[in-house]
Amino acid sequence: MRLTVREVVLGLRRAPLLSALSILTIAFSLFAFGLFGLVALNVSRTLRSIEERVEIRAFLADGTPVEAVSTAVGDIAAFPEVARVDIITPEQALTRARKDMGEFQDVFDAAVLPTSLEVRLKPGYRDPKTVRLVAERIRTYSFVDDVRYGEEWVQKLYGIRNIAGATGLVLGIAFAAVAIIIIGSTIRMTVLSRAREISIMRLVGATDGFVRRPFLIDGFLKGVVGGVLALLLAWVAHALIDNYLIRIAFFEGGTAFLGVVAGGFIGLLGSAASVGRHLRDV
């Protein structure tokens, strides 16, 4: 192992510019992928926050007994899809309406706003089909005059979420593939620069495993360093956008760590592929 580490250090000393170029190429390749990841993360969070606004509003008939309303609230709250049920009185509805549409506050009258039930759904149960089924179950109560949940809006939101998810998956795979190809080509340059050394090592009886180890460690370390640089660049980009354009979220600690580790494994795989191909040609 000591000899392997010595070979890695010697390789870095012999071609410092090529090593720096490899690290920078890995960093910028992962940085491009990281920017895409930031966009995907914030689009996903935005859609999730909008999705949380999906609700079902059941308007009750005038004169509905309080006991019947309380029983209905308990029944609806027990639905597996339902997270919370709130009773909205005419006064509360009037306050909300005046707050949300202040320019029309003189138009609203508490007498025209009926008591209603506001039903919030759990995550994973906000798709159009589930929302419609819950609304139909609520509509079966005899004292429910009307049930509304913005069916067209829910369908559009769900369609946008599906399109964003599919697009993100395809683009993510494409960005990852491009990054792997670029990193693999960069590491292959390092291997080719030491082709003579590899040939001599083979002539003196070095095994393929012994020849590979320094390159694998070298590729992994370059990948990790490149991943750290890419993370720093992504953080700078996030800070600039967050301060001067719009508020956006950054990767959580676990995600950032996985990104750096992924850089190391991409470097490792690139080295393994490049060395293996070269050893077959020697």
Image (tube, grey):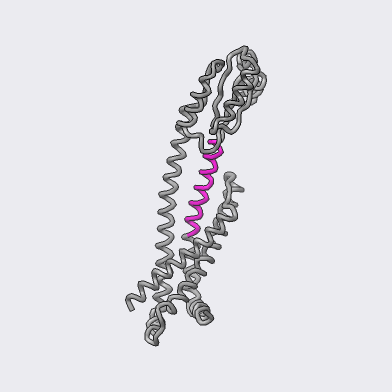
Q: Would residue 45 be counted in the magenta stretch?
A: yes
Image position of 1 (left or right of 85):
left
What secondary structure is the magenta-colored segment mainly? helix
Image position of 122 (left or right of 25):
right
- Name the foreground residue: 58 vs 276: 58
Task: Give percent across and percent down for residue 17.
Answer: 49, 74
Q: Residue at x 50, y 55 (%)?
A: 34
- Name the foreground residue: 62 vs 107: 62
Whether 277 is drawn above or below 68: the answer is below
* Residue 153 appearing in the image: yes
Quarter of the image with the C terminus is bottom left
Q: Would residue 275 be counted in the magenta stretch?
A: no
- Name the foreground residue: 147 vs 22: 147
| Span highlighted in magenta in the image | 30-51
- Residue furthest bottom in the image: 204
* Residue 102 appearing in the image: no
